[in-house]
Image (cartoon, helix red, strand yellow):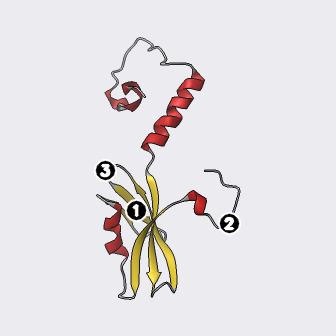
Amino acid sequence: MGDAMTSSLENHPEDTATPQPLCDEPEFAELLTGLVADTAPTLFAVVQEYGSRIDARVAAWGLAFEDHAEVVAVDRTLHMRLRRPENALRRFTVRPHVRTRLVWFDPAARTHPDDRTD
């Protein structure tokens, strides 16, 4: 995709002339789909495991971007911006018998089908 699609919109000067479209609407929609796919963050969960494979729960969800990660606790009590997804693990290690780990989201691993589309 060209620089026109990847540059910051703030860098475009205000102009009284009407700029010409890059392409027609279907092609532009396809370019946008590619832009979103290429820049999408990766979804992950912070999982707390109780004991040795006795029980577990998702404690937080995160988005891994190229240069940072955003993490939100499922109980909405915590929102963090971190350099790396792994840095969230310390915050969710609450007891000696609780181990935390990152689990990267895999839509193909869903155990029950539903109406959601990916």
Q: Residues within 10 Å of mark 3 (few under 14, many from 20)?
A: few
Q: Is residue 24 left or right of residue 36?
A: right
Q: Which residue is mark 2?
A: 112
Asked if the residue at tag 3 contacts the one at tag 1, i.e. Cβ–Cβ closer than 8 Å, the answer is no
Proximity of marks 3 and 2: CB atoms separated by less than 8 Å? no
Residue that protrudes farthest toward the left in the picture: 83
Whole-percent x, y for residue 94 in the image:
36, 82
Numbered disc in front, either 1 or 3? 3
Residue located beneath label 3 in the image: 67
Crowding at dot 1, Cα within 10 Å, few <14 / some 14-19 / many 20+, comes out as many
SS category of the residue bearing label 1: strand
- In the rendered image, the residue lying farthest to the top is 17
Q: Which mark is residue 71?
A: 1
* Label 3 element class: loop
What distance separates the C-alpha of mark 1 from that of mark 3? Answer: 14 Å
> Closer to the N terminus: mark 3 or mark 2?
3
Which of disc 2 and disc 1 is earlier in sequence? 1
**Amino acid type assigned to the residue bearing label 2 in the image:** His
> For the point 49% across and 69% down, which residue is it?
74
x and y percentages locating residue 91 in the rendered image:
33, 73
54 relative position to 9: left or right: right
User: Can you say whether 89 is above or below 32 in the image?
Assistant: below
Type of the residue with mark 1: Val
Tell me where residue 17 sits by quadrant.
top left
Q: Position of residue 106 (x, y in %)?
A: 53, 59
Q: Is residue 28 left or right of residue 64?
A: right
Nearer the camera: disc 3 or disc 2: 2
Q: Position of residue 83 (x, y in %)?
A: 28, 58
Q: Quadrant of the N terminus?
A: top left
Q: Could you tell me how far apart the alpha carbons at marks 1 and 2 are, in whole angstroms?
A: 25 Å
**In the depicted structure, whether residue 62 falls above or below residue 75:** above
